[in-house]
Amino acid sequence: MLHKDSAMSDGLVIRPSRPTDGPFLQSLYRSARSDLQWIDGEQEQIEQVIAQQFQVQEQGAGENFPGAMHYVIEKLGSAIGALTTDFGANEIRVLYLAFIPAARGRGYGRTVLQGVQKAAEQVRCPVATVVWASNPHARRHYLALGFQVEEANPAAERLVWYPGPRG
């Protein structure tokens, strides 16, 4: 499913990200991390922290998941979101899924995650993700798609979805 440009329902297209997507991905990260806007400091300082956190995320994904694949989600040719996945030996990990504010709440995340679940179903492996405690909205969506809490601590939960038995 996620190897090439992939058309999904709702007119969404998932394509591999390109170096030219950098400015969009940085802007998307900024909009997805509204929690960082609450930092007590000058706006320039806040922007530096956001840029540093974006770099930490990018570098961390590369170091911890060297096989991770980065995608841009488009609707009618316009970038509206991003997805980062890692196809590990025992599971597919959703490392990052975010949408621009105008695309949130329209079911696009559900569509993308159902596509990941479909790919996992084909190879008979679970899908896992980590959801931060500060993001109860995402947690509700994952649980509604059949994910289960497997590990929890005060900061985050590891959620896993298992494919059903073949019938």
Image (cartoon, rainbow, N blue to C red):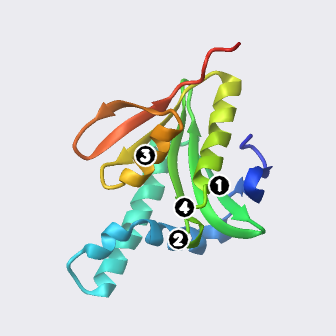
Element marked by disc 4: loop
Asked whether residue 127 is in view, the answer is yes
Where residue 87 appears, as percent x and y from the top left, is: 59, 35
The residue singled out by tag 1 in the image is 71
Q: Give, as a three-letter code, the residue at label 1.
A: Tyr
Asked whether residue 17 is in view, the answer is no
Q: Which mark is residue 45?
A: none
Residue name at image x 66 percent, y 26 percent: 121
Q: Is the C terminus in the top left, top right, bottom left or bottom right quadrant?
A: top right
Q: Residues within 10 Å of mark 2 (few under 14, many from 20)?
A: few
Q: Which mark is residue 140?
A: 3
Where residue 21 appears, as percent x and y from the top left, is: 64, 69
The residue singled out by tag 4 in the image is 105
Q: Tell me the distance, in whole angstroms, between the alpha carbons under discs 4 and 3.
A: 12 Å
Q: Residues within 10 Å of mark 1 (few under 14, many from 20)?
A: many
Residue name at image x 32 percent, y 67 percent: 35
Q: Is residue 153 left or right of residue 66?
A: left
Q: Tell me the distance, in whole angstroms, between the alpha carbons under discs 1 and 3.
A: 23 Å
Element marked by disc 1: strand
Q: Give, as a three-letter code, the residue at label 4.
A: Gly
Residue name at image x 76 percent, y 50 percent: 9
Earlier residue among tags 4 and 3:
4
Q: Of discs 1 and 4, which sits in the foreground?
A: 4
Element marked by disc 3: helix
Residue 67 versus residue 151: which sits nearer the camera? Answer: 151
- Say above or below: 55 vs 118: below
The residue singled out by tag 2 in the image is 101
Earlier residue among tags 2 and 1:
1
- Say above or below: 163 vs 71: above
- Say above or below: 125 vs 133: above
